[in-house]
Image (cartoon, rainbow, N blue to C red):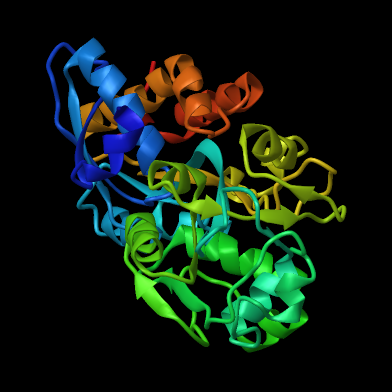
Amino acid sequence: MFKQSLLKISSALVLSATAFTSQAIDITGAGASFPFPIYAKWAADYKAASGNAVNYQSIGSGGGVQQITAKTVDFGATDDPMSGEQLDKIGLMQFPAVIGGTVAVVNVDGVKPGQLKLTGSLLADIYLGKVKTWNDPAIQSLNADIKLPATAIIVVHRSDGSGTTFGWTNYLSKVSADWKAKVGEGKAVKWPVGQGGKGNEGVAAYVKQLKNSIGYVEFAYAKQNSLAWAQLTNKDGKAVQPDQKSFAAAAANAKWDSAPGMGVVLTDQPGADSWPVTSATFVLMYKDQAKPENGKAAVAFFEWAFANGATSAAALDYVPLPKAVTDQIRASWKANLKAGGKPLLN
């Protein structure tokens, strides 16, 4: 029931957050829609446990960066990790919260979830407008067991600044020289073809409504909307299904120390079981907390999630962070978060 009703919840979701203090504090956060399903589940569970609240708005990664930069929220959320230079300039710290996967979703009569096979270069050609119909030989040759219609492909993409778009276009840039040269990567790009939907929610809704369409969403949105997702051929040439196992395989060799703010990009990773469009989602907080109790409460929400939210994350096909990674995050909180020049956390 929860999965079926999740996306009907207002994007201005009231989350719960444990408190390091004796009184409840309303905490605000905004940003990526990619982690919204798991944040919602964590929130539902933790609301019952603590009663403390934080208002998280699912507005896209670009909006999350804007809101935290403007200091209108206690934490921002982005799937496009900020660079060390950006973090230092604004005075932010960054840490991952959970790992998930982006999938191609389609609405084609007779095509079942996980049945259609695609490659990265073929996806790039579809989004470039070079492959225009579903029965194009490039698609049909990979799917001899499916009778595909001779109808135009309706391409759906994000209309807002999006970390999901960053991961998608980063991947397409890695597997298609043509895409890299003509479009490139980013939270927002100049799309050659297609129409835009706001948030993972908007793209999922468009694909569900439009026959013969294709879009890209975080995997939980595909399942919750009963959309057909496609297999993808990975870097090792193996056709894989999106699931927690393939996302975990892609993240298995992540070198979290290799990038400032642990901002590791996990697309197109090697490994026979690796899902090609895997990514972490990140949280942004000011190093110098103007409202210390709010900062403590925001940290405490994610502390609870790391300690208690692994089962619910796995149920939604996200990959919980390994203990070694959450220990590293806890150390970064203690080292970086301050209020009035003093450590925020004991």
Q: Residue at x 71, y 56 (%)?
A: 232
> Picture coordinates of residue 345 (x, y %)?
37, 21
Pick the front one: 127 or 189: 127
Question: Can you say whether 344 is above or below 252 in the image?
Answer: above
Q: Which residue is at 49% across, 83% downward? A: 191
Q: Quadrant of the N terminus?
A: top left
In the rendered image, the quadrant that contains the C terminus is top left
Q: Residue 9 location, x and y as percent?
A: 21, 41
189 to 314, vertically: above or below = below
Indicate the quadrant where residue 202 lies.
bottom left
Location of residue 110 (image quadrant): bottom right
Horizontal and vertical percent position of residue 274 = 75, 44
- Residue 284 lies, in percent from the top left, at 40, 46
Residue 275, above or below 172: above
Looking at the image, residue 38 sits to the left or right of residue 81; the answer is left
Which image quadrant is residue 302 in? top left
Residue shown at 85% from the left, 43% from the top = 272
Residue 287 shows in this picture: no
- The relative height of residue 324 versus residue 176 in the rendered view (above or below) is above
Would you say residue 177 is visible in this rendering? yes
Q: Residue at x 58, y 32 (%)?
A: 319
* Number of marks in picture: 0
166 displayed left or right of 252 = left
* Residue 285 relative to residue 152: left or right: left
In the foreground, 175 or 265: 175
